[in-house]
Image (cartoon, helix red, strand yellow):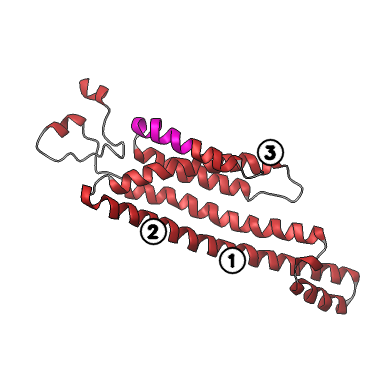
Amino acid sequence: MAWVPFPIALIAINIFVARYLVTRVGVRPLLLAGPLFSGLGFLWLSRLSETGSYWTNLLAPMMLLSVGMGLMFVPLTLMVVSHVKNEEAGAASSLLNIGQQIGGSIGLAAIGTVAWTSVAHSVRSQMAAAATTAGGASAATTSGAGAARGAASLPPQVLYHALTVGFSTGLVIAGAVALSGFFVALVTTRTPGRVRLSSALHDREPSCDEVLGTCEPAAAVAD
């Protein structure tokens, strides 16, 4: 139940973007804002603590993350299929889906590996520190063996702290990756100039892109 608000908010944002927002602001502003919100959401989540509050430490950044991800899905699809031939739209859409699935799998595996490695390192450090404080060299060896046997043999406070530290590290990396999407979108959606929409009425090819929202609005043309 703690995670239910996330998919609900994500679906709601996707519907809002598809029906209202993308037709008014274009694709480019959404592809720039989405990674920023997502990155900030991940970084906010990385500040979790084992004694934190659900409302401020989990739900609030989770909602920010859902907004960022919701802003990207529909615009990204439109950007991929907007300039391909009708008979190639299916292939372009499938390439997008494949890229999302493979990229998500590789990213999740990489970040998960970093997170769990950090968890294990935190457990070893805590147990070694506890053994040193107790003054038993043999206890350090026993603690290392206990850590290897699994979480069931660990004191709860050690496990909770290790999980928090490990997943905070993974969330920081996820935030950095998400924020890098802003710079990718900044470069890949750039058009060489802002040309009035009236140029589309002539035979020459306009240098702006209506899908990306880089053409001036109709009101500016009338002026």
Mark nearer the viewer, 3 or 2: 2
In primary-sequence order, the first of circles 3 and 1 is: 3
Neighbourhood count class around disc 1 (C-alpha, 10 Å): few under 14, some 14–19, many 20 upward: some
Q: Give the amino acid type for the residue marked by disc 2 in the picture.
A: Ile
Q: Is residue 131 above or below residue 1?
A: below
SS at badge 3: helix
Q: Which residue is mark 2?
A: 98
Quadrant housing the N terminus:
top right
Q: Is residue 10 magenta?
A: no
Distance of label 3 from label 1 (alpha carbons): 28 Å
Q: Is residue 124 above or below residue 20?
A: below
Q: Is residue 162 above or below residue 181?
A: below
SS at badge 2: helix
Q: Give the amino acid type for the residue marked by disc 1 in the picture.
A: Thr
Image coords of residue 32 (percent x, y):
41, 42
Tell me the tag on residue 55. 3
Q: Which residue is mark 1?
A: 113
In primary-sequence order, the first of circles 1 and 2 is: 2
Magenta range = 13-25
Looking at the image, the residue that sits furthest to the top is 223
